[in-house]
Amino acid sequence: MDTTRFIARHVATLPKSGIRDFFEIVAKMKDVISLGIGEPDFTTPWHIREAAIYALEKGKTHYTSNLGLIELRRAICEYVARHYGVAYRPEDEVLVTVGVSEAIDIALRALINPGDRVMFHQPCYVSYHPSVTLTHGVGVPVPTHAVDGFALTAAALRAAWQPGCKVLLLNLPCNPTGGTCDRAQLEAIAQFCIERDLLVISDEIYSELTFEGEHVSLASLPRMQERTIFLHGFSKAFAMTGWRIGYACGPAVLIDAMMKVHQYSMMCASILSQEAAVEALLRGEDGVKRMREQYHRRRDFVIRRFNEIGLTCHRPRGSFYAFPSVAVTGLSERDFALGLLEKERVAVVPGTAFGENGRGFVRACFATGYDQLVEACTRIERFVQSRR
Ligand code: PLP
């Protein structure tokens, strides 16, 4: 029996993630240096793992409140106020989620009516456009460019805006480009959002990994807290990808709407992950600082080497991604990535996995050991020279 006819049309036509596709090929190969998957090479710091072990020993094996443990929500509010300058109430303005992934999904599901338009800068995180499509919304990509360090500009937003736009989905610093915005650029974006009455979903998952300059949260700008859902999590800065834990902060009515979707789908995030997250927020900042210093050193090395090799690359101010152009090789981003993998066993992700505006670029994640990065760059240089 052909069961494909049972699949909903909008799911059947949804493309699979370009990253997964590519990494199925990588998984079958030996001796590959992977600069592909966007996750820290560090294991979660021991004291955080230990907190989860203790919690398990104490028999903490039950559901928590749908909103998440109150101790965790208090710790989140304290952390967000201290680092981002935005005050939220732990009782009704914070929701603990299963990673930022769930927070993006339930924020969109709580906000979008069929046909509503969602703006997002592109290249962007692989899940943004599909998540919009899954809520029967319409994605409106706003291009960012290497010449601006892939910062989102108010001018680009103005040019892309169309009637029906309701939400702006923002990720600064950005996966895959490492691009971010300074305060003046953010003020112009805030002004645009107020003028056009847009609600902002601000995904700040890489904010601790800002190497120079300040990270400014859009929610902290005047009149923006009331129209922003601030998303954050533990995966990147605390090296906790496998724990699946994140959170959303925002106006109580919006958090309540998101909570309804969360309550009927997830119920709550894992209690052990929540216990570990409390420890991360209370005592994890030295670990974050140490990991950031490593990423910073790796960034400086990788960006210098890519530019020496001829793969022009802007210096990402944040995240752990480099996004070089492969134009010098005369290859498309996909042929570059496939050729490099086949000839030199180095995996990078074709830029088009992050949307049309990633054409001509590849993403290289430098959350990989320094020695591995040195070897990867030697191999990439050999590959680029073979194309000249
Ligand atoms: N948002 C961005 C921009 C990401 O890059 C990622 C993961 O790569 C996520 C969200 C998902 O994070 P989490 O592990 O918290 O679900």
Image (cartoon, grey):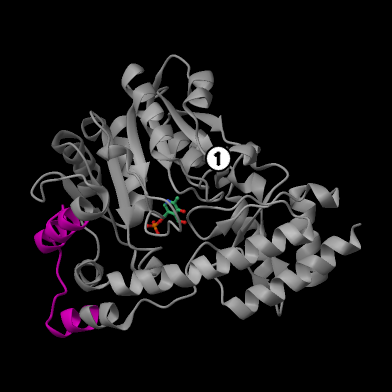
Measuring 63% from the left and 52% from the top, which residue is drawn there? 323
Residue labelled with disc 1: 12
Relative depth, front residue between 35 and 136: 35
Side of 336 relative to 373 (left or right) = right
Relative depth, front residue between 257 and 169: 169
Relative depth, front residue between 164 and 223: 223
Q: Is residue 250 above or below residue 18?
A: above
Residue 113 seen in the figure? no
Side of 18 relative to 161 (left or right) = right
Amino acid type, residue under disc 1 in the picture: Ala
Residue 130 seen in the figure? yes
Q: Residue furthest top?
A: 163
**Does residue 176 belong to the magenta stretch?**
no
**Segment colored magenta:** 52-79
Where is residue 384 drawn, in percent x and y?
83, 61
Side of 101 relative to 280 (left or right) = right
Side of 320 relative to 186 (left or right) = right
Q: Is residue 73 above or below residue 188?
A: below
Q: Is residue 139 above or below residue 52?
A: above
Query: Which secondary structure lies at badge 1?
Result: helix
Where is residue 108 drawn, in percent x and y?
35, 37
Measuring 76% from the left and 51% from the top, which residue is drawn there? 326
Neighbour class for label 1 at 10 Å: few (<14), some, many (≥20)? few
